[in-house]
Every structure is written in structure tokens, then in C-alpha cells.
Image (cartoon, helix red, strand yellow):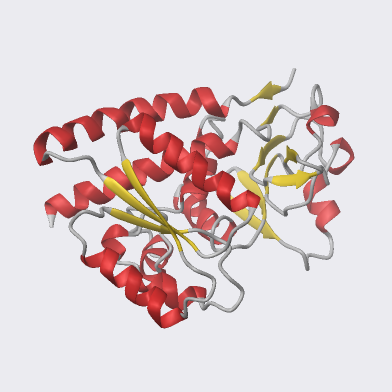
Amino acid sequence: MTQIFNGREFSRHIDERTREEVRKFSELSGRSPKMAILSTISSPDQESYIRSKTKKASLLGVDTEVIRIPYNMNESDIIEQISNLNRSKDIDSIILESPLRPNLNQFKLCMTIDPKKDVDSQNPLNEGLILMNKGSVFPATASAIKAIIETLNLEPGSEILIINRSNIIGRPLSMMLLNSNFTVTICHSKTGNLGKIMGSAKTVVTAIGKYNHFSRKDFMEGVNIVDAAINFNEGKMSGDCDLTSLVDYANFITPVPGGVGPVTTSMLFRNMMSLLERQSIT
């Protein structure tokens, strides 16, 4: 029988700890922690992600400031705006929503975010610390996936296939899993023998961004699947995997919606509290 992961229930346990830490911070500082959310494009998908963050923040007692960058604002002015947020004593964490406007340099903008306020590990300096196994704040989606994989109680050295090589999921997650003694394989759009690799993989993380692209024919029976994609088709949300075809075939699967997504949002606010702890130490 397939175990369908309940991301909403799992995230509630994470939120209990965060809510208590927020309460203690507010009592000691006399204010609520505050997150700045910057958006450079207007799209239904991005607005949905922003709403999930602001809703969660409200439930946890965290303040948010959503900054919608005008489309005609040039890059140097955006950098100055981020720099102002870095200097602000009222802002504790900063996230730059992806994707960015096509004409913007993501590397340059992310480099501008103060590493001490970099709540989604977007600054390359924080990304480098993950590579060196010295990271303390990790990309929220990668953290969510790793936390979900840990519920499987896999043996050290177990093989995990990641079908994604982005800076948000595949690259940091591979390092995080490697640092936890898993054996990691990364595949991507140019992998020629993907079907063969997938067919023999016992645990698979998929995030290719194709609506219901994979079904039971692509996996071995008894597979563990973490579907980290969010895709829309005619207003309906789904992941990369056709969930209905995998019930009673897979051992474990995360649904979309209700799987990785809620845990990702909760992990973002765990990151925020970790940043605040680091700031108090330094």
C-alpha cells in the first residue's frame, strides 16, 4: 500500500517550534520578526507563492513586507533597494522571488543580499558554505525535500536520484544529501539514458516542471518518490508525477498540492529563526 505523504500535517509540527521561537523573540525584542519579500514580475504562480508566505507568516506571528519592483526600475536601483533592506534594523530576512525579470542579473542581485539576512540561501557565499559542509541556512525547498527523505529512515549510503540541477533544488540538495552520507545521482534534460537510470532507482526526487509527465511505467515497483514540482494545466495544479497511476505501485510519494510545498514554506521560517539566532550571537 502506498504511503501518501501529508505535507500539511508534517509542516504543522515544524510550525509549532517556530511559533514558540517567534513568541520568545517578540517578548525579548518588543517587536515581531520581519521578512522582506521582493518580486520583480507579476504572474499567477508567483503571486500564489507570495500569498503562501504571507499567510504562514501571519499564523506564526511574523511580519512581512511585500515589495513589488516596478517593471521599469533598473538594476542599479533594485540593488540600492536591497542594500537599504540590508541596513534596515526593522528587516530581519530577505527573499528575492524567482524567476526574476528576464533582463536582470540574478547572480548580481543575490550577491547583494546580506548573508546574515539571506533567508533562502540565495547569496553565492551561503551556497558555497553548503558545498564546504559549513552551511547553517539552506534553500527552503531543498531543506523540505531532505526532511521528507529523512522520514523514510534510509540506510547510510542509500542511493538517491535527483532529476534537477537548479541552484534551488538539485545542486544544493545533492550536497546536503552527500553530507548526510547518501549516494547521490543527478540527472537533467541532457541525460541520455534517463529512463534506464529512473527504472532502477529506489528513491527519486523529481522537479522537471512537466505536468503529470511521469507514471508507473517510468519507475520500479516499490519506489519512493519526492515530487518537488509545481505545474499548472488549465488552472489545475499537479507535480511531475501522475499520482493516480502510482497509488498501490510506489512505496511512498509526495502529492502535489499538499506535499513538498507546505514543508518548504515552513522551512523558510525555520531559516528565519536560524538567522536571528546567528545575528544575536554575532
Q: Could you tell me which residue is drawn at 26 percent across and 53 percent down?
A: 92
Q: 247 and 78: which one is in front?
A: 78
In the rendered structure, the answer to whether residue 70 lies left or right of residue 24 reads right
Q: Is residue 249 above or below residue 238?
A: above
Q: Residue furthest top?
A: 1
Q: 177 and 59: which one is in front?
A: 59
Q: 265 and 56: which one is in front?
A: 56
Residue 181 seen in render: no
Q: Could you tell me which residue is drawn at 51 percent across and 42 percent down?
A: 51
How far across and how far down the image is residue 245, in percent? 85, 30
How far across and how far down the image is residue 236, in percent? 76, 38
Q: Is residue 139 above or below residue 219?
A: below
Task: For the N terminus, give its image quadrant.
Answer: top right
Task: For the C terminus, give its image quadrant.
Answer: bottom left
How far across and how far down the image is residue 263, in percent? 50, 36
How far across and how far down the image is residue 140, in percent? 46, 48
